[in-house]
Image: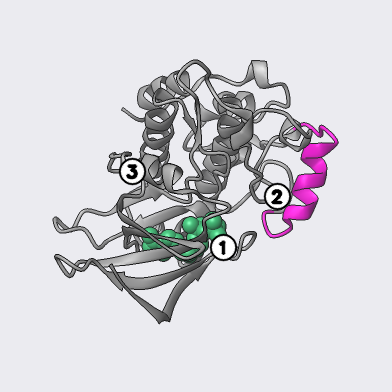
Amino acid sequence: MKVDDSLLIGKGILKRTPVYHGKLTKTGQHVAVKKMFSGIFDYKKALDLKALKHPNIIRCFAVEEKGDFLYLALELCDKTLVDSIEKGDFLNKVVPSRQDCLLQVTEAVEYLHNKRVCHGDIKPANILVTFADGAGIRRFVLADINISKKEPDKTFSSKNRVIGDIGWLPKESYQPYLEVDPSWDIFSLGCVFYYVLVNMKHPFGDANNLEECQKNIQCGKVAVLKAEDFVKFSNLKSLISSMVDHSPDKRPCIGKVHEIIMRVFT
Ligand code: ADP
Ligand code: MG
């Protein structure tokens, strides 16, 4: 792959990972190249990422190792969900509907969980929107997958523990040594659902003040989901309430979430 490190297209808030513009050597296809320190993201993880193939999961086309770094050639997307909502893309119908967004992200998470992979950092900044599809199809794509993968005999492995950004992960994820669990993704997904449906609101406070949301999550404050926020999607209020429950056992599994979403939207 060819990397143009003068063309930075993004940078993570927490890990500060640079993402550059690049091209695949053989085909010349434009890609996003994420440069990662191999101490954080090793070659095996990268190959696991490359093996994931789903329309709503970021595609990894190639992996190269140079010195202490890994370069991941990723499907080039256009913007994050945060940028998209801020620009009013849903209101102006630039992107598919909010329903499509929820459904596509749910399908991405279901695909991962069926493969015994936990995302561990689901949040609007890690959901990308792509217009750059050959068929002109606009899609929502779950990105920044740190492959928290299972060993064959185990569901999820503790050594793959990931700490995501504040404000989107459940209370228990901050307990040291606790294994990453699919129920964490369900909690984050519930917060994202609310954020999408009610235009950038967060169930635990002001979405522009994630420290406050985090404090509320950590002290076990019950999510405030106002009925008026669910005028169009009243059937989703109880689903989202259960997804963002502080008790992991009360959160539905991804299959159940998918089933309810399908029933509500079709
Ligand atoms: P980090 O692990 O540091 O959070 P991300 O994978 O989330 O890294 O990437 C950081 C930012 O770079 C994203 O929020 C987005 O703005 C941009 N970005 C990442 N991957 C792509 C991509 N495939 N296409 C376009 N932009 C991307
Ligand atoms: Mg990220």
Q: Name the residue beneath numbered marker 2.
A: 166
> Which residue is found at the position 52% from the left and 55% from the top?
38
Please check the rendered image and state whether residue 215 is part of the magenta-colored stretch, yes or no. Answer: yes
Secondary structure of the residue carrying tag 3 is loop
Q: Residue most toward the right?
A: 219
Residue labelled 3 has its Cβ within 8 Å of some atom of ligand 1? no
Q: Is residue 82 left or right of residue 140?
A: right
> Which residue is found at the position 69% from the left and 26% from the top?
245
Depth check: give the residue in front, 123 or 67.
67
Please check the rendered image and state whether residue 195 is part of the magenta-colored stretch, yes or no. Answer: no
> x%, y% of residue 74?
34, 58
Label 3 Cα neighbours within 10 Å, binned few <14 / some 14-19 / many ≥20: many
Residue 88 can be seen, yes or no: no
Which amino acid type is marked by label 3? Asn
Compute the Cα span from label 2 to label 3.
Answer: 24 Å
Secondary structure of the residue carrying tag 1 is loop
Q: Is residue 172 left or right of residue 252?
A: right
Q: Residue most toward the front?
A: 67
> x%, y% of residue 124?
53, 52
Label 2 Cα neighbours within 10 Å, binned few <14 / some 14-19 / many ≥20: some
Residue labelled 1 has its Cβ within 8 Å of some atom of ligand 1? yes
Which amino acid type is marked by label 2? Ile
Look at the image and give the residue range highlighted in magenta: 207-222
Tag shown at residue 56: 3
Q: Which of pointers 1 and 2 indicates the residue nearer the eye?
A: 1
Question: Is label 1 in contact with label 2 (beta carbons under 8 Å)?
Answer: no
Q: Name the residue beneath numbered marker 1.
A: 12
Of pointers 1 and 2, the one earlier in the residue sequence: 1
Of pointers 1 and 3, the one earlier in the residue sequence: 1
